[in-house]
Amino acid sequence: MIRIRMGKNNKEERIQKIVEIVKRNQKITTKELSQLMKVSEMTIRRDLTMLQKNHVIERKHGYAVFEHSSEETGLDLESYDFHMASIQNLKEKEKIAHYAAGLIEPGDWIFMDNGTTVSRITASLPVAFEYTVLCCNLALMVGLVKLKNVQMIMPGGYYYPADQTFSSPQAEEFIRCHRANKAFISASGIHRSLGITCINSHSVANKRSFLDSSEKKILLADSSKFDTVKSNHFAELDEIDMIVTDSMIPESWKEYLQKKNIELKIV
């Protein structure tokens, strides 16, 4: 049996290790994970519950099972993996998503982008009043269908398992036929001169449609995304009205965004 050495008692590090182990083994018991990680079975069960809620693993007949094996999805495990990205900077993403959910008002029309921060918003969405959400992401759809007060719209398209996105020219046209009060946008990179970028090219058309068809553009991004550049450009900073991020954002960025008249919310 392989033993896992852990450094600091870090929940995020532990959960990443659990995902790696489950992905490698395809199925493993709670007891085996407990022995490998050198933590209690109760701790492992809590971690697995969180991973199941985020659609990273399934629990079947006493085993933890990876939801999508590399053979099923065709994922390149060295490239972007929605499952692994979803458990990075957990606390920051949850706080950002929770704040964003609080911005929704009765009767709003909302666009929700793909991305691991935006997808967390479903856990905090208002349930006391009605509003409409248009999204193109499987994780969002799974969360939204449970809310009776939300009118959900999916434009459809081809499914891309790497980031759980639906996209097509027809979906882009469908989005552009609608208007939203607010758009919650995700990004993999934010740079002063090179703009806002993402990893997957198939996401660009949806993102542009959301931006072009919404009144208020709200970027949800943890601080690790600043001063980062990815391969696919989809927007300039000037197009964004508000950025919601965590307290680790560099001071230089606070000053820069203030000069650009972009509202900054730190959670």
Image (spheres, rainbow, N blue to C red):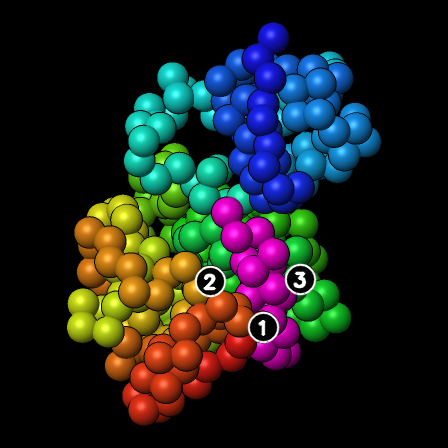
Rendered-image quadrant of the C terminus? bottom right
Q: Residue 105: where, in percent of width, then height?
A: 61, 79
Image-quadrant location for residue 190: bottom left
Residue at (72% x, 65% y) in the render: 127
The residue that disc 2 covers is 222
Asked whether 208 or 29 is in front, the reply is 29
Badge 2 marks a residue whose secondary structure is loop
Secondary structure predominantly adopted by residues drawn in magenta: helix
Q: Residues within 10 Å of mark 2 (few under 14, many from 20)?
A: many
Q: Earlier in the sequence, mark 3 or mark 2?
A: 3
CA distance for labels 2 and 1: 10 Å
Q: Which residue is mark 3?
A: 124
Q: Is residue 94 magenta?
A: yes
> Are dots 2 and 1 in contact, CB under 8 Å?
no
Q: Residue at x 40, y 65 (%)?
A: 185
Count residues near mark 1 (Cα–Cα under 10 Å), then give few for <14, some for 14-19, many for 20+.
some
3 or 1: mark nearer the eye: 1
Give the residues in magenta.
88-106
Please identify, in this view, whether the residue under mark 3 or under mark 2 is nearer the observer. Answer: 2
Magenta span contains residue 92? yes
Residue nearest the observer in this picture, 84 or 101: 84
